Amino acid sequence: MNIIVCIKQVPGTSEVEIDEKTGVLKRSGVDSKMNPYDLYALETALRIREKEGGTVKVISMGPPQAEQVIREAYMMGADDGVLLTDQKFAGADVLATAYTLSQGIKKMGDFHLLICGKMTTDGDTAQVGPEVAEFLNIPHVSNVRKILSVYDEEVITVEMDMSETVEIQEVLFPCLITVEKDIYTPRLPSFKLKLRTMDKKVHRFGLKDLEDQNRYHYGLNGSPTQVLKVFPPPKKDVNEVWRGSGDELGKRLAEKLKELKFIQE
Amino acid sequence: MSISYKKVDVKDIEFLKSVCSSERVFVGTAIHEDYSHDELAGIRRFPDVVVEVTSKDEVAAIMKYAWDHNIPVTPRGQGTGLVGAAVPVRGGILMSLVRMNKILELDEDNLTLTVEPGVLLMEISKYVEAHDLFYPPDPGEKSATIGGNINTNAGGMRAVKYGVTRDYVRGLDVVLPDGKSVRMGGKIVKDSSGYSLKDLIIGSEGTLGIVTSAILRLLPLPKVAISLLIPFSTLEEAIETVPKIIKSKNIPTAIEYMERRVILNAEDYLGKRFPDATSDAYLLLTFDGNTREDVEKQYEKVAHICLEAGALDVFISDTQERQESIWSARSAFLEAIKASTTEMDECDVVVPRKNVAEFIRFTRKIEKEMEIRIATFGHAGDGNLHVYLLKDEMADETYRKKLAMAFDALYKKGKSLGGHVSGEHGIGYAKREYLKKTAGETYMGLLLRVKNAFDPKNILNPDKICC
């Protein structure tokens, strides 16, 4: 069972500042980390490997220093890692990012399952995962909240969290899933693995290593999206106040908890 | 100092209403049940009247009246104490200070924060950290008031490197039992001006005076904090590693120990999985500093020490999400253990750090011999252990008996190792007997004389600590 996980390096704090004049993210001096949602993807992959055997490889796109997140994935137990890094990949929107990743994945060889986090904390689009699947022409399921079973390198059964309902889907390999936060609690990086993988290679792919070498398909050139302005969304603190008798409020609370899927019927 | 007090009557209530307005004075069934107990001690008594004060002048006026009329007064913060210190065991007036919850001044020139006693611990850290400053004391109960923290000399998890509440109190405004006010200490770093009365108030559990404002000492906020979660096959192995860490001179801010069974309780209680619960015992260390490199350098040395000492691995928690996944569970241990049983009582003993392992071995022995479930966790780095004796399905009578026997044995053992009855929760009402038994007559006599110097009428929080 071969699994590939897409991971990304993002700013280390959720309180990212944006330069009001230029609309650009202030990245200087900001610590970086692996996108928290990708930790769930990696954990899912490692758990499947523990049961089914096989390998877990990770792939990321970013500047050379993004090697850090590949090393972190090694410290969590990943077997191998690829960093797509090239000046020509810079300035990519979701489409160009997904295309670049799909090209890198093709070069990594056969796989059964591709796993992505639900979204990133710096982009928030949740589009890259499904777009990668489209470029690779494989089925995909997003918002997976539970892995029900994995059968013989053939099929995986998952619970997909739609906002109103939960769908159970059976998907043939190769396929892509994006997983929800809290599908599993991610393990912590291990110091022992850090020592063991210190000299382990991180493969680097540039444009010249990929099947499609048309530079207009990558980076800013390959990005139809134009960012006009970046601004932090207003913080929403929504409080609902309900009034009524204990009985009414109890029923209403139960309804709300069902709606939020905290409890089941 | 057994004294009979005046019973609160209508006239007294009228007086309190004249000072505080009637909306903040509660009698009879209007008194919330919460005011009759604290978080743990199983000691219950309703006050005759609850009054919620909002200023030093109100505190002073009420104390003067209580003094003149010989009415007992029990000050109370959020009631998160564990030894009954805030329970009005003689009835009388319960003075709640939670409405005095203003942050009065941040003085960045002197690195001090002046607060009223009802400000919550979590509000203090949030406020100062927004200014890149740091109030180091870090007790697990973040919804406690700073007044309560001062009155118990609360410790918490960062004591290994930063010390306890006492080390961060520069000055106090205190209303004495007779209603007079006095300032102790101030925004000063040094003070050799006579006896340190401020230090007598700290840890006095509301028996000597009522703190109406406090000047706290702040530090620059360390920019990076990384924790290590270190699994061991046995608790003993984990604890025996602690002196080696301390000896290495790389001082973590926190050295906590935890057992798998307590982690599982916390998982059930929070409905969340801990990042690793496959080993029987864990050490949890935190390192802080100004750069990641600096912190990594510190922790790597210690990580090697742990691996050499038999640790199964060393897990690194270096992001906000990872820290939350660990520390939210750690902070919920007390509540989680509580939820796992029918009733419990605790021993908050403190021993010299190198004797922690021996003390824990002893609790295991007691658990077996007396057939009572004992859960422990605590601050391995500062020698302060939290030992919980759980009732489970035991009959009341049997539990009381076993509890008394087990406590006797535990405190005796603590003393023989050079320890004290309480590391951070205080003596209050529940632990007086054990203090008396272990501290000796001369020591208890001094405590009584101090109490007498401040409160000769014994109206302020009577029947606590030493009388």
Image: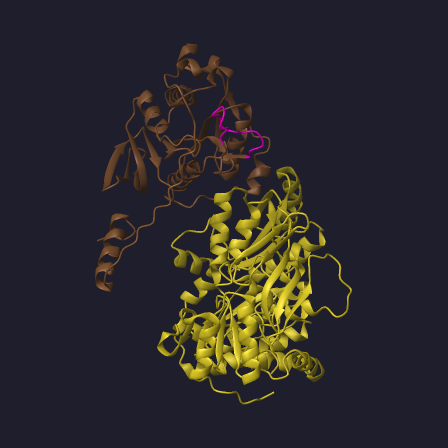
Chain colours: A brown, B yellow
Looking at the image, the residue that sits furthest to the front is B18
Quadrant of residue A156 within the rendered picture: top left
On-image quarter of the N terminus of chain B: bottom right
Does the magenta run of residues contain A43? no
Residue B395 percent coordinates (x, y): 40, 81
Residue B416, compared with residue B379, is above or below; it is below
On-image quarter of the C terminus of chain B: bottom right
A231 or A13, which is in the foreground? A231
Residue A196 percent coordinates (x, y): 58, 37
The residue sitting at 45% across, 63% down in the picture is B335
Residue B214, compared with residue A235, is above or below; it is below
Whether residue B3 can be seen here: yes
The answer to whether residue A80 is left or right of residue A124 is right
B110 or B442, which is in the foreground? B110
A246 or B213, which is in the foreground? B213
Residue B167, compared with residue A215, is above or below; it is below
Residue B41 percent coordinates (x, y): 48, 75
Whether residue B390 can be seen here: no
Residue A132 percent coordinates (x, y): 35, 24
The answer to whether residue A18 is left or right of residue B395 is right
SS assignment for the magenta stretch, majority: loop
Identify the magenta region: A18-31
Quadrant of residue B3 within the rendered picture: bottom right
The answer to whether residue B344 is left or right of residue A199 is left
